[in-house]
Image (cartoon, rainbow, N blue to C red):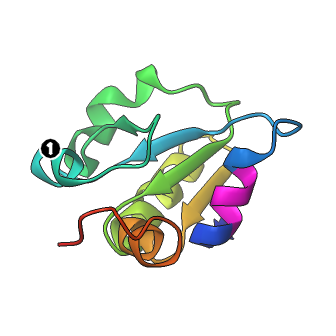
Amino acid sequence: MDHVTAPELAAWLADPARPRPLLLDVRENWEFETCKIEGSTQIAMNTIPARIEELDEDAEIVCICHHGARSMQVAAFLERNGFTRMTNLTGGIHAWAVQVDSSMPKY
């Protein structure tokens, strides 16, 4: 599993030469409705095992949660289940709100 900071992810998403990763937001619905990175796909952590077939094992996936702990657990789970291109957003959506998008609501 790789790790990426919020500014590094922002640069990645802004780089047209780099393929865009799947931004997998594993927070609960209410959290996702409060704030999200544009283009994210939300699948709550507790539903990942039941919905794993919806994900492409070969895709570059960046896991996102509030502070980075749940997303790291999901990334590790996916790796154990054959996914090889997993990245965790260090500091989660909170870091994104503080370091990249100061207009984003914090909770």
Query: What amino acid type is highlighted by mark number 1?
Result: Asn
Q: Which residue is mark 1?
A: 29
Residue at the right extreme of this rendering: 17
Q: Is residue 22 above or below residue 11?
A: above
Quadrant of the drawing holding the N terminus: bottom right
What residue is rendered at 64% in x and 70% in y?
7
Magenta residue span: 8-12
Judge left or right: residue 10 versus residue 47.
right
Viewer can see residue 1: no
Residue at the front extreme of this rendering: 103
Q: Position of residue 103 (x, y in %)?
A: 34, 64
Q: Position of residue 17 (x, y in %)?
A: 89, 37
Judge left or right: residue 81 versus residue 102.
right
Q: Position of residue 81 (x, y in %)?
A: 54, 42
Q: Position of residue 46 (x, y in %)?
A: 21, 48
What residue is rendered at 23% in x and 39% in y?
47
Quadrant of the drawing holding the C terminus: bottom left
Secondary structure mainly formed by the magenta segment: helix
Foreground of the two, 103 or 87: 103
Foreground of the two, 80 or 96: 96
